[in-house]
Amino acid sequence: MAEIAPESPFALLSEDERRAWFAYMKVHLRLRYEMNRQLRADHGLSLADFDVLVALTSDEDATLSVSDLAVRIGWERSRVSHHVRRMAGRGLVQTSVSAEDKRVTVVSLTASGRETLATASPSHIALVRTMFLDALDDHGTGEFAEWFEKIYDNLITHGTLPRPVDHP
């Protein structure tokens, strides 16, 4: 690995810590780029659209409040509100006022959104398998999942977002 300047904030990390962090960031950024590119080219969806559609399927009724959706995908509520407004304009979701609390906006998956997700999912999963999962063997996949589950639990413990209801 290249020398790190003493004034770099990453000089505070050990060489192995830097290696792990930089490897994660390279994969994270590149994989999100590739997934976004593929979804846009093949299905006219952004990765953000896909994230919202998948999150809505985590609910039995495919309906979440804007706040719950924000927690589920790790976005600010204002970003969710703006994004679902654009998606509603394309017929992928619909928004309404909660029957229980008129101050709460709920987002629901439409039939068109469900169909779009079903159409986009096979090629998206093929890309994930090719670019990510195929790099792991059967033993490595389970071990990798365990490490990321530990990291996720650490994020819940030390982060500011609550654990989504569908994440054990």
Image (cartoon, rainbow, N blue to C red):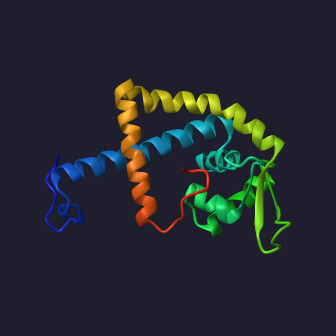
Q: Is residue 67 above or below residue 123?
A: below
The residue positioned 13% from the left and 65% from the top of the image is 6
**Residue 112 percent location from the top left of the image:** 81, 41
Along the horizontal axis of the image, is 87 left or right of 77? Answer: right
The residue positioned 61% from the left and 48% from the top of the image is 51
**Residue 140 percent location from the top left of the image:** 34, 30
Residue 141 visible in the current orientation: yes
Q: Along the line of sight, which residue is nearer the eye, 146 or 31?
A: 146
The residue positioned 76% from the left and 43% from the top of the image is 113
Extreme residue toward the front, this view: 168
Number of marks present in the image shown: 0
**Residue 11 percent location from the top left of the image:** 18, 62
Along the horizontal axis of the image, is 24 left or right of 57? Answer: left
Q: Along the line of sight, which residue is nearer the eye, 140 or 30?
A: 140
Residue 137 visible in the current orientation: no
Q: Is residue 107 above or below residue 110?
A: below
The residue positioned 78% from the left and 53% from the top of the image is 108
Along the horizontal axis of the image, is 36 left or right of 105? Answer: left
Q: Along the line of sight, which residue is nearer the eye, 85 or 63?
A: 63
Residue 98 picture quarter: bottom right
Q: Is residue 43 above or below residue 110?
A: above
Extreme residue toward the right, this view: 99
Q: Is residue 28 above or below residue 160?
A: above
**Residue 93 percent location from the top left of the image:** 78, 51
